[in-house]
Amino acid sequence: AADTMSPILAALDPHQRAAAEIVDGPLLITAGPGSGKTRTLTHRIAHMIRDRGIPARQCLAVTFTRRAAFEMRERLESLLPDDWRDVHVHTFHSLALAIVRGRGIEVHIADTAERRVLLMDRLNIPERKAGKLLSDISKARRTQTDSAALRDYRDAMDAKGWIDFDDLIAMAIQALEDDPGAAGVYTHISVDEYQDLDAQQYRLVRLLAPKPDSHLCVIGDPDQAIYGFRGGDARFFTTFHDDYPGAPALHLTRNYRSGGKIVTASAQVISAAGPVRKLFEVVRENPEKITIHTAVTEKAEAEFMVKTIERLIGGHSFFSLDTGRSDGRDTDYGFSDFAVLYRTEAQGEALVEAFERSGMPFLKYSAGRLIDKPAVRDFIAALQDREQAITAASLRGLDTRDRHSLERLLTACGGDNDRVMHELQFVSEADTWDPRADRVALMTIHAAKGLEFPVVFLPGVEEGILPLRFGPGDDTDLAEERRLFYVGMTRARDRLFLSHAERRLWRGKPRAMPPSAFLADIERALLAHSKTDLKTKPTDEDMQIDLFG
Ligand code: ATP
Ligand code: MG
């Protein structure tokens, strides 16, 4: 009966609860965005520990981004005030480092800047090609294909005694192959965002859960696979049943996140190329249609977003609001309820200018790692020299944003400094995003995976940007671009604005940009159109930046 049910399970619906109650053996959960996959995973772990007596230190949860790991820890903290610290919540990389260090191996993980310089110095690669080559090498590693560049790179890295993030996973695999017993410390394993696993990561999971009846739960949504470009492969959903025959496969059917029109429109987009997806049961109805906004230029598009946020928030000066929402005004939304999610980093640069001009509080999350920043590295090095614990007071001297990030990290690690140092290797600026800070969020769609916002803007829904295509003959993976659009749309709870600019600068020249073909897959009844009119012909300056220069 409901009154005797554990409160952890009572917070789940019957389908979610059924999944959470399967604690023994392998389990596969597939479900669409906003169906409570991550919530189910977290509550399932809490249920194991609190209601079934499984020691917290034997539980491992692996997710994809640091930010997701933070959020998972936060949810576990509220469910398990006494035990949450003992649960191992990791990204693949931090897990690999823990395994490697567990064998007493110390490593230097070279950052992107170091690896780029290595390519330039040792292999005579021109600077402009170094970034692309690094990502090609990484993809070769992740898909386990050999290449000459990869071999040269390996030799150069070995000569330095350095490793990279992909090596780290390989080293962990090696460590577990050498000493299979080491995997036994984790008896109950959960993997979120399973659709984005690559071959190496799958291998690591296999080693941690080697038996066909291992307690391994994987959760994901094949429709949200967006890392194919670097080796992510949704075929591991099929592989799972080969390796864990008889694993129950459960499905969640209710969308708790998004209003009905957003649920329907996104289902139409993803179903347009492939089988028609079963419609979700919708929990939240929303009267608002989805807006498609046509802007004359990229600059007008940015202004549209700023104006819309102002309108929804109630207008007035924003400068005083920097400190938070509590200025006594009665508005529906705070700034942090808004997110602008874009396809390319270059779009983000242009948006920063527009938002700076508006005076609206915002934060752009770049993909860079926190530890790649010189100020942060210096700070860490100084601390290590003095072997001194990191305290909140010692964070002075860093700029506000970095300090904020580090403080958040310290809190998340519960004062365990060895673990700060450990985590810091992996933290990106996007990961240290603080949902309580009242700022509009600017980030790539990739970075927004797993997140949700009341109001979402997707700018640049144009042929060439979403789907991204650099030129004719470009081998764009259209299916992956479509899934990316789907991931972007499904971050929205109440309102969704899809916008496109009619003209942008493209390789130095203004160019007409056709709207994305994906837009045509949404039924008209769900859409409202708006358009900014410019009385004069736009100048190049209006187009602001050269996206693909
Ligand atoms: P994504 O595919 O985007 O990662 P998800 O399936 O992991 O989504 P969650 O983030 O776990 O979905 O849940 C989406 C939202 O719905 C969250 O705000 C969550 O708290 C809420 N939610 C999920 N299940 C329930 C429930 N049973 N009761 C109330 N709210 C719920
Ligand atoms: Mg999730």
Image (cartoon, grey):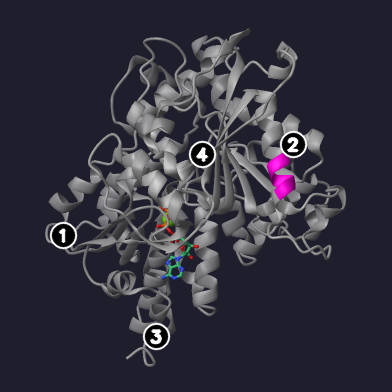
Task: Please report contact status of discs 1 and 4: CB closer than 8 Å, yes or no.
Answer: no
Q: Where does the N terminus fall, quadrant-wise?
A: bottom left
Q: Nearer the viewer, residue 260 or 133?
A: 260
Q: Which residue is farthest top?
A: 509
Residue receiving disc 4: 445
The disc placed on residue 355 is 2
What is the distance, in whole Å, between disc 2 and disc 3 at their CAs? 47 Å
Residue that carries the numbered disc 3 in the rendered image: 6
Report the span colored magenta: 307-311
Q: Amino acid at mark 3?
A: Ser
Asked if residue 385 can be seen in this view, the reply is no
Mark number displayed over residue 212 = 1
Identity of the residue drawn at 80% across and 37% down: 358
Q: Earlier in the sequence, mark 1 or mark 3?
A: 3
Q: In the rendered image of this protein, does residue 327 appear above or below residue 168?
A: below
Mark 3: which secondary structure?
Answer: loop
Q: Residue at x 64, y 57 (%)?
A: 435
Mark 2 C-beta to ligand 1 under 8 Å: no
Mark found first going from the N terminus, 4 or 2: 2
The amino acid type, in three-letter code, at marker 4 is: Ile
**Is residue 236 placed above or below 122 in the rendered structure?**
below
In this rendered view, identify the residue nearer to me: 124 or 251: 251
Mark nearest the camera among 2 and 3 is 2
Disc 3 residue crowd, few under 14, some 14–19, many 20+, Cα 10 Å: few
Separation of marks 4 and 2 at Cα, in angstroms? 18 Å
For this rendering, which residue is in front, 88 or 19? 19
Left or right: residue 244 versus residue 30 is left
Can you tell which of label 4 and label 2 is closer to the viewer?
Answer: 2
Q: CA distance from mark 3 to mark 4?
A: 37 Å
**Where in the figure is residue 37, as x and y percent of width and height?**
38, 60
